[in-house]
Amino acid sequence: MDSSSSSSFEAVMDMQIAAWAATTSTGALTIARPAYFKIKGYRSDVKFIKGAKEALAIGPAQLKETGYKQQSAHPLFTGENMFHPDNVAALNAVLHGHLRRDSRVVPEIFESINDSLLLFGSPTSEGLSRAVFGYESISGDEDRLAGVGMVAHLPYSWDLDKDNIAHCAQRWVPGLNSPTIRPNWPILCPEGKRLFPDLHHDDFLRTDLLLITKLPNILADASRGSEHYIVSVGGAHGTGTRAFERLLSNKGVLRRIAEDLKIDPEVPGTWPEAYQVLLRVGDIRHDAQNGSIAEKVDYISSVRISESSDWWDGWRRRLAAA
């Protein structure tokens, strides 16, 4: 249940309690203990999840104020006005379906790039993510990207060199007349472990992976404030990226992330300046018209990234000089 639904529920409960109180002869309300604790627990849970989203920088109010930057770099969707449909679907989910089909494309956003940014898509499809994390093409091949920048120093990253990957994955992407066939990009984990999305016998995705990363906004001057950030939402494939919507409504997974990152939603001092979360998405429904859409998201792991201000400033200088 989302925050608006929970607010409605609480309003109804308050009205009912007020009505019950008004019908008693003494004006006092008697409520069964199990119902009282259930209501109290529900409200506590809603409050915790709301705070956890804010601590992770994916709360509704934050997302409304965050800039959405999309620079298409996918080899199947090139051109100034072309965007990967799965990345746009993820953005539309965050905006609750309010993204109009005739929304204007603004190729340059010099001012908003200094504020907080939400990036959809891995560096295979999203150009600004490629710059921020530090991926460069090998010999001009867009399916061979080497992580030569910050990403080489982060706990999790995408392996985007097709020469390292034997198998390809298939899935449907809206607007295309045939299944998309792409290398089955894995996620590189601590201690050299590689996690691949699982494939069916026909090579269609059975599961996908989603990597969420929050960083200080290293595109902006630090003196503009310490709370500007970048949140990157990038699946191994677009199906994973699109599943961000499932995370936002999954209270159990959000609670587990907050607990593992040792977040107290009521204490901003415990909120991570930077973190990474790895999720598995499943129950994928493959549909030629609507695309391959995951119905389920499961938690794998998360890590808090604790670096000095000088470390982040070093990456700011490198990006500014690029």
Image: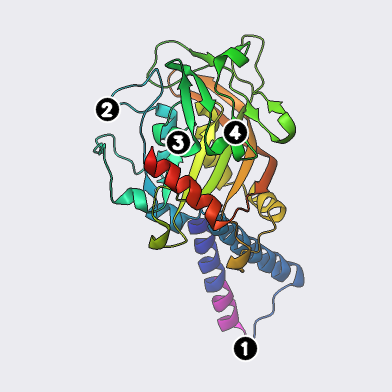
The answer to whether residue 312 is above or below residue 225 is: above
Label pair 2/3, CB-CB below 8 angstroms? no
Magenta span of residues: 16-27
297 lies left or right of 71: right
User: If you read the primary sequence from the N terminus, does the residue marked by circle 2 or circle 1 appear first?
Assistant: 1
Residue 18 painted magenta: yes
Task: Judge depth for marks 2 and 1 and give the one in front.
Answer: 2
Residue depicted at 71% across the width and 52% down the height:
260
Density class for disc 2 (Cα within 10 Å; few <14, some 14-19, many ≥20) is few
192 or 258, which lies in front? 192
- Real-space Cα distance between discs 3 and 4? 12 Å
Which residue type does callout 3 highlight? Ser
The image's mark for residue 129 is 3
Label 1 – label 4 distance at C-alpha: 65 Å
Q: Are marks 2 and 4 in contact (CB under 8 Å)?
A: no
Amino acid carrying label 2: it is: Glu
Quadrant in the picture for residue 209: top right
Mark 1 — residue?
25
Q: Badge 4 is on which residue?
A: 157
Q: Which amino acid does label 4 sit on?
A: Ser
Q: How far apart are marks 2 and 1 (CA)?
A: 70 Å
Q: Which residue is drawn at 49% across and 29% down?
A: 135
Question: Mark 2 = which residue?
Answer: 80
Mark 2 vs mark 4: in front: 4
Q: Image quadrant of residue 160? A: top right
At a point 60% along the width and 19% down the height, the residue shown is: 205
Is 190 left or right of 86, judged from the image as shown? right
Few, some or many C-alpha atoms within 10 Å of disc 3 (few <14, some 14-19, many ≥20)? Answer: many
Do the CB atoms of the residues marked 2 and 1 lie less than 8 Å apart?
no
